[in-house]
Amino acid sequence: MSNPNTQTYSWPSKVVESEFPLIDNDPHFTRVIRYARTSDYVHGATAAAAGPGALWLMERFAPSQAGKGGFAKAMRLTGFLGLAGGFLYYYQRSILRFYGMSENAREIEMDMREMVDKVKAGEPLYGVSKLSPAMQGVAARQSRYSALFFGVLPWFNFVNHNQHGVDTAKYYQQAERELEAERLGKTSS
């Protein structure tokens, strides 16, 4: 049982100025994956193939004389590093649209549709969390804008919380408009 005298604090999240509208400053990992564009997959795959491709080319033009199995081990390691780097590049391209740091009109529409559907269904906007509000705040502060530091430390948000740096009233207002339009459409027919 929680102590009613215990106060929880929620600091307002910092908003980074950008050219495009902010969708979410701490999107959940799966949401970033779902909103990825085909171009993100292409860029990620290209980045993943660059390392092994370069190693293979260097071996063709200037053999390393690594001996039996030496090149295969180097290719496996380079392949793993290429896949990891390609995934991070793909993920970062997608998440930067949530931050409004690149063109994000498609994602804005997808976000509005997803959230309005959740409002209409009576579901929580950002999912249900098993963590206390205090721990949700800690998780949010640790992963907010984390993709801007991916080059040093890849950090993802796996926690459902309600601290995303946007005014959620827009989703409720849009849901009310759509429900009213549906109601008027049914009464006129």
Image (cartoon, rainbow, N blue to C red):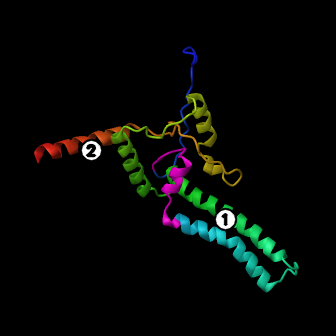
Q: Earlier in the sequence, mark 2 or mark 1?
A: 1
Viewer can see residue 161? yes
Q: Is residue 31 magenta?
A: yes
Query: Is residue 97 shown above or below 56?
Result: above
Query: Is residue 39 shown above or below 59?
Result: above
Residue 118 as seen in the image, left or right of residue 90: left
Residue 87 placement (x, y as % from top left): 62, 61
Query: Is residue 61 shown above or below 88?
Result: below
Residue at x 65% of width, y 48% of height? 155
Between 109 and 52, the one lying in front of the other is: 52
Residue at x 45% of width, y 49% of height? 21
The residue under label 2 is which amino acid type?
Answer: Glu
Numbered disc 2: secondary structure: helix
Residue at x 58% of width, y 61% of height? 90
Q: Which mark is residue 57?
A: none
Magenta residues (range):
21-39
Residue 64 as seen in the image, left or right of residue 2: right
Q: Mark 2 highlights which residue?
A: 178
Splitting the image into 4 quarters, where does residue 119 fall? Answer: top left
Viewer can see residue 100? no
Q: How many marks?
A: 2
Residue 33 placement (x, y as % from top left): 53, 56
Residue 126 placement (x, y as % from top left): 47, 41
Q: Mark 1 highlights which residue?
A: 83
Query: Is residue 47 shown above or below 130?
Result: below
The residue under label 1 is which amino acid type?
Answer: Leu
Residue 132 as seen in the image, left or right of residue 177: right
Give the distance between the C-alpha atoms of the residues marked 2 and 1, in whole angstroms.
Answer: 43 Å
